[in-house]
Amino acid sequence: MDTADLDARVIIAVAFGLAPSHVVLHPDEPVDAGMLARLTPLLERRLSGTPVGRIVGEREFWGLAFTLSPETLEPRPDTETLVEQVLARLPDRNRPWRFADIGTGTGAIAVSLLHELPNAVAIATDLSEEALRTARGNARRHGVAERFFPIRCDFTAALGPEFDFLVSNPPYIPSGDVGRLAPEVRLHDPRLALDGGRDGMEAYRVIVSESVRILRPGGGVFFEIGYEQAAALKALLTSRGFADIAVYRDLGGRDRVVCATLAN
Ligand code: GLN
């Protein structure tokens, strides 16, 4: 996606301490030498391939700004489809939902859901202590920290039973393809958040088999997937007793989200 115009605006706003909208509304404001000196190093990083989010240290997701760290994946707009489908499938936003976000990274998914579900509680897991610190900071930043519980573990390993639903954007790139990702992804997103094993399905195998232990009967799973993984994940979910399996597309029209319910 060509985002040069937006990139430029965000970088200028950060360099000058302005709101991005100010840059749009006042395009003719003069720039003095001091301002230029602050702008140049940021522009140079962008020109050498560093994504804007990494330069400014945060990325907007679900209308909220999320602080990034080198150990967190940068949240993507496609993942908003996942948040949307969770909200679409829950019968009532006000219930005291208890959900787990597996591999939380910045916490973007869990924090956005907590923002929309006023009585929900999230347990968020990650292998990276640094990612969990970042996620906790993001939960605080958006006023949901008292309902956000980070736990350091491999996928679901430390979780007990009785979750209403699980949500996850796990690593799903086949190991052999990670080296072929665009440099902006390969050099700046953590490998731990990308590498899904030989066929990219390893995380789903672990989480789906564990979900039978940690979901309440009738509980749901919501996964982001690579766009060619819908059929394989549907087969895996069916083999583990899930029903009501649905696939949703992202804004680019590619399969991106798979939801299912654990049969009672
Ligand atoms: N959406 C990321 C990418 O393709 C991958 C994220 C993931 O593996 N969960 O760049």
Image (spheres, grey):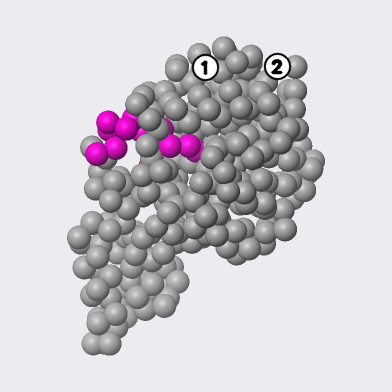
The residue carrying pointer 2 sits among few (fewer than 14), some (14 to 19) or many (20 or more) residues within 10 Å by Cα, namely some
- Would residue 180 appear left or right of 229 to someone viewing this image? left
Residue at position x 24%, y 39% in the image: 179
Q: Which residue is mark 1?
A: 236
Q: Nearer the viewer, residue 152 or 253?
A: 152
Asked if the residue at tag 1 contacts the one at tag 2, i.e. Cβ–Cβ closer than 8 Å, the answer is no
What is the x, y in percent for residue 203?
Answer: 48, 31
What residue occupies the far right of the structure in this picture?
95
Task: Specify the quadrant of the image occupied by residue 163.
Answer: top right
- Would residue 258 appear left or right of 232 to someone viewing this image? right
Task: Look at label 1 and name its amino acid.
Answer: Leu
First in sequence: mark 2 or mark 1?
1
The residue carrying pointer 1 sits among few (fewer than 14), some (14 to 19) or many (20 or more) residues within 10 Å by Cα, namely some
Q: Nearer the viewer, residue 242 or 149?
A: 149
Start and end of the magenta stretch?
169-179
Task: Look at label 2 and name its amino acid.
Answer: Ala
Using the image, determine if residue 81 lies above or below residue 242: below
Q: Main secondary structure of the magenta part?
A: loop
Residue at position x 24%, y 65% in the image: 45
Element assignment for label 2: loop
On whether residue 172 falls in the magenta region, the answer is yes
Q: Which mark is residue 263?
A: 2
- Asked if residue 125 can be seen in this view, the reply is yes
What is the x, y in percent for residue 39?
Answer: 28, 76
